[in-house]
C-alpha cells in the first residue's frame, strides 16, 4: 500500500514538472512594461553654411529659413517619438531618426529664398532707375530756374539714388553667384526630453532632459541610444527591457522548450505587441496624464535578418516603440511603416539592437 502511494505521488510530481506554462494575457504584458516606455520630444534646428554665410533652418516652422539664431530659437522645430528603458543608468533606446532627424529639404528652401530675394532686388533696381530718370528729367526741365542750393539738393538726391542702385546690383551679383552645391547642414538639438506614462506634461520642464549617447552608423539599422542627463530616471520603471528569453518554460521544462534563437526570435503568423505613443502628445495627453497605446498584430513575413514585418498599425510618434512577443520578449524596435499603408510596419530585429547596444 505504501509502495502504491509512493508511486502515485511520484507520478503526480512528474506530471506537474512537465506541465506547460501558458503565456500571460496581453494586458498583463502591457501592465508589466508600460512604465518602461517613454515619449520622446525633440526641439531642434539646423545651421546651414553656404559659402561664407550662415543661415538657420527650422523645417516644421512656417518661415523655415532664418537669418539670425535669435529668430530660429523662437521658431524651433518639434518632433516626437517613442523610446524604451534598457538599463538602470538612464539609458533609452529609440530610432536614429527620432534622436537625429535629417532634412535635406533645406536646399530647396534656400533656393526658393534666393530666387525670391533676387526678384525683390530686381524690382528695387527698377524703382531706383525710375527715380533716377525722374530726377534727371526734373533737373533738365527746371535747372534754369533753380538757385544753387536747389541744384545741389537734386544732385545729392541723384548721387544717393545711383549709389543705392549700385549697391543693389552688387547685392544681386552675390545672390546670383551662390553655389548651393557647397552648402552643408549641422543639426542642433536645442532640447531633448522624455515623458513617462501616467505623468502630466504641460511644458518641456515637466520632462526629463536627455543627451544623445550613440547613433548607429549602419544605414539599415535605424537605432539610437539616449541617456538622461543625471543618469537616473525621475520615474522608476517596474521592469527593464532585456535581451533574455522570458519564457518560463525554458527554465521549468528545459527538455521540452529550447531557448529562443535571438537571430530568429519569432516565426511567421506569431502574435506580437507594440507599446508606443502614436501621434505623440495629441493622443497621449489624457485627463489621467500621458498614456501610451498597446497594439497587436501578427508576423506577416519570414525574418530576413534585417527587418521584421508585422500587421501592427503605426502613426507618427510610434517610431522607436518596442515590439514584444507573447512572453514579453523584446523582438525588435519599430522604425517604419509601408508607404501608403498604416497596417504593415517594420522593426529592427533584436539581434541588431543587441549588437548596437553592446558594441
Image (cartoon, grey):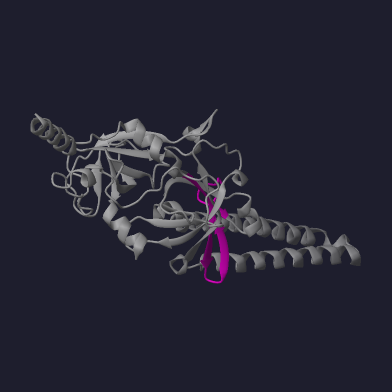
Furthest-front residue in this view: 1
Q: Position of residue 298 (x, y in %)?
A: 23, 36
Question: Who's the residue at 24% across and 54% down the image?
Answer: 306
Q: Position of residue 29 (x, y in %)?
A: 34, 36
With respect to residue 281, does 53 lie above or below?
below
Which residue occupies the foreground of this view, 253 or 126?
A: 253
Q: Position of residue 165 (x, y in %)?
A: 67, 64
Which residue occupies the foreground of this view, 264 or 75?
A: 264
- Magenta segment: does it hold 47? yes
- The answer to whether residue 132 is left or right of residue 217 is right
> Which quadrant does the C terminus fall into?
bottom left
- The answer to whether residue 43 is left or right of residue 357 is right
Count of numbered badges drawn on the protein: 0
Question: Who's the residue at 55% across and 37% down the image?
Answer: 199
Residue 5 lies in quadrant = top left
What segment is highlighted magenta in the picture? 39-65
Question: Who's the residue at 78% across and 57% down the image?
Answer: 138
Amino acid at each position: 500500500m505504501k509502495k502504491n502511494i509512493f508511486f502515485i505521488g511520484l507520478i503526480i510530481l512528474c506530471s506537474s514538472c512537465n506541465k506547460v506554462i501558458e503565456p500571460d494575457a496581453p494586458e498583463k504584458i502591457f501592465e508589466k512594461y508600460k512604465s518602461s516606455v517613454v515619449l520622446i520630444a525633440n526641439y531642434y534646428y539646423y545651421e546651414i553654411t553656404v559659402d561664407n554665410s550662415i543661415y538657420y533652418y527650422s523645417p516644421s516652422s512656417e518661415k523655415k529659413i532664418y537669418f539670425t539664431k535669435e529668430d530660429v530659437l523662437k521658431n524651433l522645430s518639434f518632433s516626437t517619438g517613442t523610446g524604451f528603458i534598457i538599463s538602470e543608468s538612464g539609458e533609452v533606446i529609440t530610432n536614429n531618426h527620432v534622436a537625429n532627424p535629417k532634412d535635406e529639404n533645406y536646399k530647396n528652401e534656400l533656393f526658393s529664398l534666393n530666387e525670391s530675394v533676387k526678384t525683390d532686388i530686381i524690382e528695387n533696381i527698377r524703382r531706383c532707375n525710375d527715380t533716377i530718370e525722374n530726377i534727371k528729367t526734373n533737373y533738365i526741365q527746371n535747372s534754369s530756374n533753380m538757385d544753387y542750393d536747389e541744384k545741389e539738393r537734386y544732385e545729392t538726391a541723384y548721387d544717393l539714388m545711383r549709389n543705392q542702385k549700385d549697391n543693389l546690383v552688387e547685392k544681386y551679383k552675390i545672390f546670383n553667384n551662390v553655389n548651393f552645391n557647397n552648402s552643408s547642414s549641422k543639426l542642433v538639438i536645442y532640447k531633448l526630453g522624455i515623458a513617462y506614462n501616467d505623468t502630466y506634461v504641460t511644458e518641456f520642464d515637466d520632462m526629463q532632459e536627455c543627451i544623445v549617447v550613440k547613433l548607429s552608423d549602419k544605414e539599415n539599422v535605424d537605432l539610437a541610444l539616449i541617456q538622461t542627463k543625471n543618469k537616473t530616471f525621475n520615474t522608476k520603471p517596474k521592469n527593464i527591457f532585456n535581451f533574455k528569453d522570458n519564457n518560463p518554460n525554458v527554465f521549468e521544462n528545459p527538455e521540452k522548450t529550447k531557448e529562443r534563437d535571438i537571430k530568429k526570435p519569432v516565426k511567421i503568423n506569431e502574435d506580437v505587441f507594440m507599446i508606443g505613443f502614436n501621434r505623440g502628445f495629441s493622443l497621449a495627453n489624457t485627463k489621467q496624464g500621458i498614456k501610451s497605446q498597446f497594439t497587436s498584430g501578427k508576423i506577416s513575413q519570414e525574418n530576413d535578418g534585417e527587418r521584421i514585418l508585422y500587421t501592427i498599425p503605426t502613426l507618427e510618434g510610434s517610431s522607436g516603440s518596442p515590439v514584444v512577443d507573447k512572453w514579453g520578449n523584446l523582438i525588435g524596435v519599430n522604425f517604419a511603416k509601408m508607404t501608403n499603408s498604416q497596417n504593415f510596419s517594420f522593426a529592427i530585429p533584436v539581434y541588431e539592437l543587441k549588437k548596437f547596444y553592446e558594441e
